[in-house]
Image (cartoon, grey):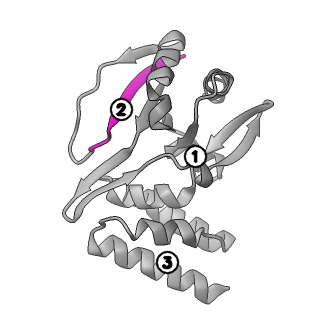
């Protein structure tokens, strides 16, 4: 799977596509889980059409149905070297308080080099929010909380910005509690 990620990264980087890796592969690269499920890419809105065409050249696009509660603006699924690759733009989830959207923000990306290729990583804090909103993914949010406490680091700026979007009270309260606990530790 790492070779497939590397090949996709080469393709996107050479074509100046703005992208970030998220999902289980992001957790894997931070040593939070032992094995990724697939490759999840968040792509800048302006680059989505070109990204889709590039991935059609290296893999097979699969049909996807829109599923509730997801309200993502653009979502495509590919099989590349027998690996599932989900490509999203403006990743959004509807909930009782509204719709929460995670767009690619270049300022939130970090870079990890794998075999001399830049892998742009989305920030864990963005995925911490998304995992709380996704059905049956709250365990991953708990793993991220543990990671934040274990390494005593969390980007409070990103979490405070997340609170500016509509969130269910229980998630808003959980984020406030995390921020309070992290400030207490420092």
Give the residue pinned by disc 2. 75
Q: Which residue is drawn at 32% across and 53% down?
A: 134
Give the side of residue 64 with respect to residue 178, left or right. left
Q: Circle 2 — which element?
A: strand
- Tell me how far mark 1 sits from mark 3, CA to CA: 21 Å
In front: 7, or 167? 167
Residue name at image x 43 percent, y 31 percent:
86
How many other residues sit within 10 Å of disc 2, few (<14), some (14-19) or many (≥20)? many
Closer mark to the observer between disc 3 and disc 2: 2
123 sits to left or right of 152? left
Instruction: Reply yes or no: does residue 77 show up in magenta.
Output: yes
Q: Which mark is residue 26?
A: 1
Point out residue 173 in the picture as x, y percentages from the top left corner.
Answer: 36, 79
Q: Which of marks 3 and 2 is nearer the N terminus?
A: 2
Q: Are marks 3 and 2 in contact (CB under 8 Å)?
A: no
Residue shown at 73%/43% (left/top)? 112
User: Which part of the image, by quadrant, shows the C terminus?
Assistant: bottom right
């Amino acid at each position: 799977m790492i070779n497939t990620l590397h090949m996709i990264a080469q393709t996107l980087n050479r074509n100046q596509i703005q992208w970030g890796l998220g999902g289980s592969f992001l957790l894997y690269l931070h040593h939070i889980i032992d094995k990724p499920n697939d490759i999840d890419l968040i792509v800048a809105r302006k680059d989505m059409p070109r990204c889709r065409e590039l991935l059609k050249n290296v893999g097979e696009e699969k049909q996807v149905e829109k599923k509730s509660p997801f309200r993502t603006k653009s979502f495509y699924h590919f099989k590349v070297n027998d690996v599932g690759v989900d490509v999203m733009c403006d990743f959004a989830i509807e909930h009782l308080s509204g719709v929460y959207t995670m767009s690619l923000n270049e300022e939130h990306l970090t870079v990890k080099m794998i075999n001399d290729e830049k892998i742009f990583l989305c920030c864990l804090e963005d995925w911490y929010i998304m995992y709380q909103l996704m059905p049956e993914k709250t365990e991953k949010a708990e793993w991220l909380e543990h990671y934040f406490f274990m390494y005593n680091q969390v980007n409070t700026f990103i979490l405070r910005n997340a609170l500016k979007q509509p969130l269910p009270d229980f998630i808003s309260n959980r984020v406030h509690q995390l921020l309070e606990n992290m400030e207490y530790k420092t």
